[in-house]
Amino acid sequence: MTAPIITLDGVHKTFTTRKGELHAVDGVSLDINAGEVFGVIGFSGAGKSTLVRLVNGLEPCTSGRLVVDGHEVSAMSEKQLLTVRHDIGMVFQQFNLLQSRTVAQNVAYPLEILHAQNKQWDKAKRRARVAELLDFVGLADRADAYPSQLSGGQKQRVGIARALASNPKILLADECTSALDPQTTDEVLELLRRANKELRITIVIITHEMDVVRNLCDRVAVMESGKVIESGEVYDIFSRPQHPTTRRFVQTSLRDRPTPAALKRLAANYPGRLITVTIRDEDTAGRTVVNTLNDAGVHADLVYGSIVEIADRPYGSLTFSLKGTEDQVAGAIAAVRDFTDVEVVA
């Protein structure tokens, strides 16, 4: 088995504040595999941005072991870290573009720094690399524009092109879609997906948006108060969340279950028993549920729900109103519970 490209083993990061010690990252252990898109999600203050700053050595670990592409970052000096950072690109929430430079000059900037260090990126090579990257992100016609002349989505595309300039093995994206509207977010996520697939780059994306995780990531870690409270394959985290915080995140993305106000309206309009049924890929997107309810002899009306694709597999929930005798309704619920989760909601 290939060794992970990033390994955190009992990593701590503690800051000293006026109020005492703040454990921003508290004993985190994670493996991130080469070539995957790994999400780190949490509410504000969870420690996720500090975690990503540890990976590229912008913050030193207080304790624990952190290895990036075979280099023990947690034991390296600032001078030694410069070499490691050449293989790590960074994309920021607020773009961090140089306003006095054109788009092309912004993308070329990290290559200029590298050339000053190793003389391997002369003007001709820089010009060719910049043209290649601007074509990749769809901004070849904006090479001579300045950041002030770009939309938010275009600025982030420039940021991604700049982060990819030196052919890094790892791309760290810290809340890179938070300042964008939904359509532009989708476009940026598609660009990151292409970078992962076509350039074979490992992506670690920090976010507080579960939609980003659902649409982009292979695996995800959920953070709270500096700790990883849950991690795993994205589909498993969505379909069987274990921690209350994870369930809150999942619900913000799926919106497949009726709110209390919606339940009141449904109960008034549909006098039967209301049940919410979890739909997973093994249920063939609900057909087995419907067939089971019909076979039980109840009348089932579908009154609420949503099914989406997560990692190319369907997941969601459907709310039904069941009409029939008490025995028929109880038998129908029991039959569905044999193969999936059922909640009686009204």
Image (cartoon, rainbow, N blue to C red):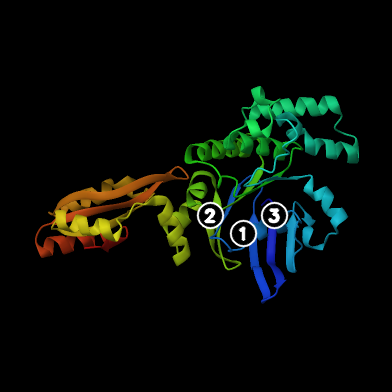
Where's the C terminus, which quadrant? bottom left
SS at badge 2 = loop
Disc 2 from disc 3: Cα separation: 21 Å
Classify 10 Å Cα crowding around label 1: few (below 14), some (14-19), many (20 and above).
many
Residue at numbered disc 1: 48
The image quarter in which residue 275 lies: bottom left
Sooner in the amino-acid sequence: mark 1 or mark 3: 3
Residue at numbered disc 3: 6
The x, y position of residue 117, in whole percent, is: 89, 41
- What amino acid is at disc 3? Ile
| Left or right of 218 on screen, residue 92 | right
Vertical side of 8 occupied by 204: above or below: above
The x, y position of residue 5, in whole percent, is: 70, 51
SS at badge 1 = helix
Sooner in the amino-acid sequence: mark 2 or mark 1: 1
Q: Is the Cβ of the residue at disc 2 closer than 8 Å to that at disc 3?
A: no
Is residue 338 in view?
A: no
- What amino acid is at disc 1? Lys
The image quarter in which residue 155 lies: top right
Disc 1 from disc 3: Cα separation: 15 Å
Give the mark toward the camera: 1 or 3: 1
Disc 2 from disc 1: Cα separation: 9 Å
- On residue 208, the disc is 2
